[in-house]
Every structure is written in C-alpha cells, then in structure tokens.
Image (cartoon, helix red, strand yellow):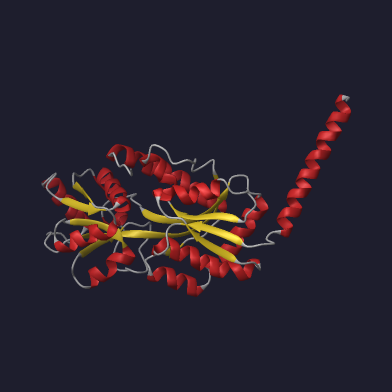
Amino acid sequence: MSKARFAVSAISLAIMMLGAGAVSAQSYPNKAVRIVTSEAGGGTDLGARLVAQGLAPLLGQPVIVENRGGAGGALAADIVVHASPDGYTVLYYTNALWLAPFMRDSVGYDPVKSFVPVILIARSPSVLAVHPSVPVTSVKELIALAKAKPGTLNYGSGAAGMMAMEQMKAMAGINIVRISYKGAGPALNAAIAGEVQILMAASGSIGPQIKAGRVRALAVTGPTRSPAFPDLPTVAEAGVPGYENAAVFGVLAPAKTPVAIVSRLNREMARVLAQPAVKERLLAGGIEVAGGTPQDFATAIKNEMATMGKVIKDAGIRDE
C-alpha cells in the first residue's frame, strides 16, 4: 500500500472511530446504570442512594446501587476498574480510595490512571473536641497546653480522624500521643468516657455528644464553617492557618470513559445535588454538598494526595 493510501485509510479509520464514539455518547444511556459503593449503611451508602434516586429520572433509566464493602475500598474499586468504560458502571467512594495506596502495600489500582473523575459530590468535615476535663476552650489554648506539656496529652481516632489529627499536629508543631481504635465509634466512646482527652470525629456522629455536654467542641476541620455548627470556627481561623481536612465523597468512572458521557453524568449529578431535599438529607448526616467540574475534582484529588501523602508517610499511618 502506498504512503498516500495508508494515510487516507488511517484518517478514515480515525473518523469512523470518532463517529462511533459520538453515536455511543448520543444514545447514552439505553440501559441501567450501576453505582458501586461501600458496604450498606453509613454516609457513603446514603450519598450513593440519594444520587441514584435523583439520577434515574434524569437519565430515563434505572440506577442501581451495588454495595461492595471491605478491603479499604479495593473490592469496589476492582469492579469499576475492570468494567467497560461506557458510563454504565461508576464508583461512588471517599478519599480513602486515593489515600489507600499511601497506607497499604498493594491496592490493585492506580487512583489517578485507573479512573476518570466525574464529580465531587460532598465533603464531611470533622469536629475537633476535648473531654470536659481538659482545661481549654479554644484551639489556641489546646496548642499552648500541648506545647507546655509535650507528649502528655492523647487523642483517640479511627483511620480518618487519625489523618486529620496528625495533619494538625504537624502544622501546629505539637506532640500529642495517638491512641488507635478500630473505627470512629469506639474512639468516640473512649472520648466520652475520658479514656482519651482529644478527638477528631465526623460532625454527624459527634453532634449529639456535643449538645449533651459529654465533649467540648473547639473547631471544625473543613475549609469553611459548617452549617451544622455555625458558631464553631475552622481550625485554620482558630489557630492553624492553612489547615483543611474533610472526608470527601465523589463519583469516578473507569479510565477511557468518553468525555461526552462523563460530562453528561457530571451535569445530571449536579442537578441532583442542587435539589433542596438532597442537601438537607446529607446535611443531617454532617455531609455538605460540593459539586463542580470533573477537572475540579481531579485537582482536588491531586492536591490531597500531595498534602496527605506526606502526612501519612511522616506519621507512619498504616491500614493493614
């Protein structure tokens, strides 16, 4: 075959492939869409089901939630990584997905190369609190006490609270001893009982304990004040400039999913998030709606991997 004929054939093939992709995107969706997420129950499952319920009428197809818990998100991720990149199987998960590689020897996926971000659904900040016996009422006072008595204060946490607290310790230059628990629930119970003095806990779970006076709230860890605790300052404004930490919930599709399909999903999910009932339901669980473009989500992932990757490595945090 001549070079000229080969070039023409190559161009024709490329046009045909682009045309096929366009037709595929235009006909999407023509069957049920599957959202794979964590185990049933909890904030992640709640968010996935709210998105599914709102998304189905907008797409004109059933949207099914499939729960696959365990292995720190690896099981759910594995299903989506090996799914066809056609928009019919997506992953709804937290930032544990892209932080797990820093804490585990093997996860079976690359958090950047294996997925394409669709939309940042929501954030759930934690609350920094102390047992009532601790003689502080602000972040600045807590930092001052920790500096005056290095290594004598302790905090309890599950994995998420551990990362939030270790980040604050590093940025504030303080030495507070970590007491690890198997999950946020046991850590919260330990703080209520006075077994630990300090706690970082999800706002949805710690709220009732704050109202009951069992723990004293000092600040929220998000970038802005929380609608659930409007009177609480952020950690950043209360004494640790630049600090920001929150659980992040988002939707990702398999790598190589067509841009047109990703854009469609982003657009329709944004419409779901704009619904007042969805916002109210999430906020009741301490989860704040986010949104934005796929690129916004990709940037957020990249920034958090850079920031928290160092914190995890320096603190020796492992999730075996």
Residue that appears at 88% across and 28% down: 4
| 162 horizontally vs 59: left or right | left
Q: In which quadrant is the N terminus drawn?
A: top right
Quarter of the view holding residue 316 = top left
Instruction: Decide if residue 158 is on the left or right side of residue 19.
Output: left
Residue 60 vs 303, above or below: the answer is below
Q: Is residue 259 above or below residue 127?
A: above
Tell which of 211 and 56 is nearer to you: 56
Q: Residue at x 49, y 43 (%)?
A: 111
Find the residue positioned furthest to the top.
2
Residue placed most toward the observer, 29 or 237: 29
Where residue 152 sits in the image (x, y, percent)? 11, 47
Total labels drawn: 0
- Residue lying at 60% horizontally and 64% vertically, measured from the top left: 268
Q: Please say whether residue 78 is visible from this viewpoint.
A: yes
Residue 115 located left or right of residue 168: right
Q: Nearer the viewer, residue 82 or 98?
A: 82
Residue 254 drawn above or below residue 282: above
Compared across the picture, whether 252 is left or right of 233 comes to right
Residue 294 position within the rendered picture, expressed as x and y whole percent measured from the top left: 56, 52
Residue located 73% across and 54% down the image? 24
- Residue 88's spot in the image, x, y percent? 62, 56
Check the picture and name the quadrant holding the C terminus: top left
Q: Is residue 116 visible?
A: no
Residue 219 position, x and y percent, is: 27, 60
